[in-house]
Image (cartoon, rainbow, N blue to C red):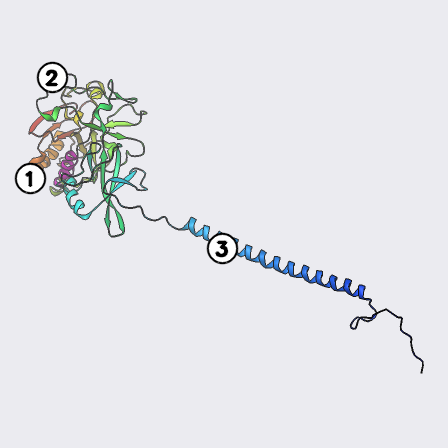
Amino acid sequence: MTSIPLVPGRRHHRIFGGLSERQEHIFTWIGVVVVLLYIAAWAGAIREDIDQQREIARAQQEAKIKTAPPPPAAPSRQITSSLTTPSSPTAAFVSNALLTALAPLRGASGDVYFATRTPNARLVPGVNVVTPNNPGIYTLASEIGQAVQSMSNFNVITLVPFAAKQNGHIGLYFIGSWPFEHGGKPKTPAYANPVGFIEVTPQNENTQVSEHFKLRDFLTKGQANVWPKYMLLNPKLLDKLELTIQELQAMGHPVKHMTIMSGFRTPSYNSTGGNTEGRANLSRHMYGDASDVFVDNDGNGVMDDLNGDGRVDIHDAEVIDQAVERVERAHPELVGGVGVYSACCGHGPFTHIDVRGYRARWRGFGNG
């Protein structure tokens, strides 16, 4: 038998035959490094996946925050919380008891949609709800439990104080002076200076102030491009007009449209604007509680043939007068003036109606 001699001092790996001990160490460390790199790559992939999942969750949470509806505003007894109606910048949250207390403000007709107050005034006597400091048109809302519901067809108008008028103007809008503003004593409080004005803008002029009328219907003619405008409007006048419409319909005269030929007149316009024939120096138009009206269901711009005699004349204005008489008998708190006018000076017949506080009757020509 032939033997193969071994080289003294040289060891061979029991697994990887033919490798020296040094080569074995090198090979082992290479394997360790490869394993460590693999582990590091695997851990990095896991960490990247976790970060990605966290980013997705964060994005989803942000999306929920952006799309979730905002929590309801806390109700307040003062007119401070916001509503989205453009013409009604804020709202008062009121109880059902207060809604009951507000019912008389709708008038005997039930069709008056507004009340006027000076800034920081009590809305209803004996109830701790005050109007805002800033002039404007405000919508009321009622709170029942957690539900908040706006009070339909009713606004509170906070007035611009009379003191805001300087040299006959508020801003660019020219108003003039009231008869007793610079001296003299009015014969009744109804002829005293007004306490404030309704500010009318292009954004709020279409505010419904009663069932059949809007704020713009009562604006003074003239100064067409000057905004804001300022006016007076007594809710009692609206109540009387709505009751008159109801009476006309009860008398067999359906009213689809009643035209306000002349509503509020600034003192300046009352004395100089348009055709001034027949205008009184103490006209109730200057106090916001008078209007000249005619029924115009067919939209032709003149009085309809209310009495059915085939003519349009002063007798049709008298039909409205008869309705007003019935209103005043049923509601003496709305007593005032009524004047019937024949066609004249480019307009048809009309009826003047006001709530001056005492009875007055006349017939005339020209402007009421």
Q: Amino acid at mark 1?
A: Ala
Secondary structure under tag 3 reads: helix
Q: Work out whether mark 2 precedes mark 3 in sequence or the reverse, and give the earlier one.
A: 3
Residue at position x 42%, y 50% in the image? 65
The residue at which mark 1 appears reads as 330
Crowd tier of the residue under label 1, counting other residues whose Cα lies within 10 Å: few below 14, some 14–19, many 20 or above: few
Taking depth in this image into account, of 252 and 264 the one nearest to the observer is 264
Q: Is residue 300 visible?
A: no
Disc 2 to disc 3, how far (Cα)? Answer: 77 Å
Residue that carries the numbered disc 3 in the rendered image: 57
Give the quarter of the image for residue 202: top left
Mark 3 or 1, nearer chain start? 3
Q: In percent of the image, x 19 and y 48: which residue is there?
A: 96
Q: Residue at x 24, y 35 (%)?
A: 132
From the image, give the main secondary structure of the stretch colored magenta: helix
Q: Which residues are magenta?
A: 235-247
Disc 1, SS: helix
From the top left corner, tell me how far across and down residue 271 is, in percent. 19, 18
**Residue 25 in the image: above or below residue 361:** below
Q: Is residue 294 left or right of residue 146?
A: left
Question: Which residue is pictured at 14% across the width and 30% down the height?
Answer: 351
Quickly name the residue at label 2: 184
Q: Quadrant of the N terminus?
A: bottom right
For marks 2 and 1 on the same chain, the one whose residue lies earlier in the sequence: 2
Amino acid type of the residue tagged 3 in the rendering: Ala
